[in-house]
Amino acid sequence: MLIKGFEIPGLHIQRFDSFSLLESMLCSTEEACRVTVCTYAVTEGWLRRLALLKRAGKISAATLVLDYTVMIRHREKLPLLRGVCDQVYLTNSHAKLMLVEGCAGFQATAVCSANATNNYRIESYYVSNRTTEVNALRDDLRGILQGAVRIIGG
């Protein structure tokens, strides 16, 4: 389900789930993209949907940055994470952001209130393809990853 009225750039408060935001961003380009998702929590259903997008060729690589404390309590998700994600990092973070980058120059980023879960409720998000904002968020993500521990990927 795509987000109704989705625009890049755009600021919205509406009923959606975070996967719909990711799908809407990916529908803005024909090329396969590298996707980085930083979230406090992730569900198995969300990961299965991510795997379907990878198999469909919409995602060339997937990186997840998850909260350390939450993942310690949910270690049963590790086999699924290994099967879907190219890299997984753990850190103490409550950030919820997405970075989508294509090889031919497409780029978009989103900051949202929603975790990577299947909860469909009123959430807020800001999505942009402006180079300065994408670069700023990419830099912020690098800062988050400096203190993170990589548990999957090379």
Image: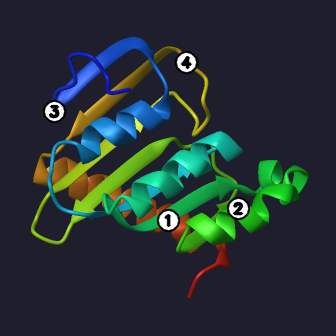
Q: Residue at x 36, y 58 (%)?
A: 56
Instruction: Tell me how far mark 2 sits from mark 4, CA to CA.
Output: 22 Å
Q: CA distance from mark 3 to mark 1?
A: 23 Å
Amino acid at circle 1 = Thr
- Report whether 31 appears left or right of 150: left
* Nearer to us in this view, 75 or 143: 75
Q: Earlier in the sequence, mark 3 or mark 1?
A: 3
- Which residue type does callout 3 highlight? Pro
Residue contact between numbered discs 3 and 1, judged by CB atoms under 8 Å = no
Element type at mark 3: loop
Pointer 3 residue: 9
* Local SS, label 4: loop
Q: CA distance from mark 3 to mark 4?
A: 22 Å
Q: Earlier in the sequence, mark 2 or mark 1?
A: 1
| Residue 84 percent location from the top left of the image | 58, 65
Foreground tag (3 vs 1)? 1
Mark 2 and mark 3 in contact? Answer it, CB < 8 Å: no
Query: What residue does disc 2 label?
Result: 80
Q: Which mark is residue 120?
A: 4
